Amino acid sequence: MYTQALDIPQQQPEGNTPPAAENPVYQAEFDAKIDAGGFIEPKDWMPESYRKTLIRQISQHAHSEIVGMLPEGNWITRAPTLKRKAILLAKVQDEGGHGLYLYAAAETLGVSRDELTEALLSGKAKYSSIFNYPTLSWADVGVIGWLVDGAAIMNQIPLCKCSYGPYARAMVRVCKEESFHQRQGYDALLQLMSGTQEQRDMVQDAVNRWWWPSIMMFGPHDKDSVHSGQSARWGIKRISNDDLRQKFVDATVKQAEVLGVTLPDPELKWNEARGHYDFGAIEWDDFWNVVNGHGDCNVDRLAARNKAWNDGAWVREAAMAHAEKHAA
Amino acid sequence: MTEQTQQASPEHVEYVLRMGDNALILGQRVSEWCGHAPVLEEDMALANMALDLIGQARMLLTHAGRLEGRGRDEDGLAFQRNEPHFRNLTLCELPNDDFARTMVRNYLFSAFMVLLWERLLQSRDAELAAIAGKSIKEARYHVRHAGEWVLRLGDGTAESHARTQRALDYLWPYTAEIFADTPADAVAEDARVGPAWSTLEQDWMAMVVPVLEAATLSLPARTPFRSHGKVGRHSEHMGHLLAEMQYMQRVYPGANW
Amino acid sequence: MERKEWPLWEVFVRSRNGLDHKHCGSVHAPDAKLALQVARDVYTRRQEGVSLWVVKAEHIVASDPDAKPELFDPAEDKIYRHPTFYKLPDEVNHM
């Protein structure tokens, strides 16, 4: 259940060993459950490092959804038709919903949404770097749907089977809702590509800017990934960064052809022996620069979230004050 | 009146267009909140309301375009007209300002729309009656959502009370326009397309005053101030709203999106 | 300024009449009325429900996972409670 508040009503009976950070019996049960592909639920014993890793991963995921509302939200008021405006608004709203489901999943691990929010607002917590790139034209909205959501879906589907129950259930809901996100992006791009030269140029420009950041979304190469090994063992990360990235590239090449755009990588070509597309070297310096706060929009994104939160403080207080006044 | 390609009276067109423009312009304003609300839960709620309004605008503008018979569709009407040709209430175009003004406006406007949609269920314009059947459910939720917030903000903290009173003081003069009939009202009433909006004022007052009082707000007095968005004389804010909303269609004329 | 987080509410949705309410997630809200409203706005955007329950999370009493053996294992060997325990002749096996 999605709550950290499911406290056991009674004290532990005397003599029972309370769940402790290092308890070989509990650890063995936990390991057996994980190995059998079972689920861990909120009040079950879990190693402290598992709990911490999950809080970090789920809250980063939630923050990404929330910050992710901003780049596309930038185009809601300027969407070129009413139909596109409605689709975009529904989509950005969905991202907010996904953030909400994920915060709720994280809260089952004993942190509050306010604590997580503060970590985001202070810059302490990370979110997906992809949202620190700017949306400069209407085509960016379509390309984000196609490439960024496409990459996100590849990352997210395996998480529907992750070992932590609340996270897995949140991801089932997220993936179900996201199924229209990539399609609406691709649909918007198809429309643009069948339009004027100016529209087609707009798409190509957007693809040129978003391609590399999208394939960086899968994270560092497996050999350089700090958390991957342990996370895989725990079943909270089921497919490696490089495998997912390859899967994404393989799927996207064909879609780019149908669309009629060129992916900006001269080394991209089919490798018969591997049965996969080869692609060029990723500029990791660029990736780390953005991760470390030096991307185009890092400062603006956090400022926007801080402003919304600070401007809303009196509203949140007023609602609580009213509830307390009228509770009697 | 199923296939309305023939011309309806200009007043009939204007009556429907006015409603479409209200929904469009307020929907545009409410959508500005997306990603910036005080809590995530309200982000969801405000986006739902904006989606309802944009949906209503699409139906109403499509219908107005057919009634008009000049080949303009929803997007033609939304993106290719200038300020003087928009028929929305000035109330709808005013900037959001803070959450208090947003909620008070949503409440005052949605309360009126509940009353109007109720009457339009019996419209002789069958398409308008059908739109009313769908929209009244949405408006009832909007008035409930915003009304609950007006209660909490008015009767919350000292700060929220002050902000909400300030919002009401600012918005109240603009509500006079809702009930100031134009020639379109009389024609629409005679043709039983819909009521003259002035006839809804009493019911509206009976609906909103108790809620404002329960929210511990004091009702501003009526003043000679009048806004005239309904006849195309808008506030200075309207041009900026349109400049943003219409930007793509203006920069790339004739393109499909 | 003293900061107070809105309480957490668990949300249960009945997807259609004839079915039980099922837990679908949680929301933060200052009171019950707003909790219902936001539950509607968050969890029924795609016609997921016809009825909603919200319960303050702190009011839910949960069983202790450590008590799983004594609570749930004793039911394990009562196989005679299940219809499949009884082998009946084919002619009447739809019973």
Image (cartoon, coloured by chain):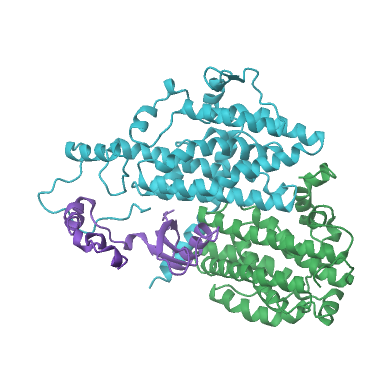
Chain colours: A cyan, B green, C purple
- Is residue B41 something that shows in the picture? yes
Badge count: 0
- The quarter of the rendered structure image containing the C terminus of chain C is bottom left
Pick the residue in front: A171 or B210.
Answer: A171
Q: Quadrant of residue B76?
A: bottom right
Q: Is residue A245 left or right of residue B80?
A: left
Q: Residue at x 27, y 55 (%)?
A: A7
Residue C7 in view here: no
B113 is higher (above) or lower (below) than A132: below
Residue at the image position 70 percent from the left and 34 percent from the top = A259
Return the residue nearer the eye: A292 or A102. A102
Image quadrant where residue A267 sits: top right
Q: Is residue A9 above or below residue B139?
A: above
Percent from the top left, x then y, of residue B59?
74, 63
Where's residue A280, x and y in %? 59, 18
Considering only vertical position in the picture, is A314 above or below B176? above
Q: What residue occupies the far left of the structure in this picture?
A: A15
Q: Where is residue B246? Give x, y as percent.
A: 78, 49
- Judge from the rendering whether residue B186 lies leftward or rightward of residue C16; answer left or right: right
Instruction: Please say if B248 is above or below B196.
Output: above
* Image spot of residue A11 (x, y percent): 18, 55
Going by the image, does C33 lie left or right of A268? Answer: left
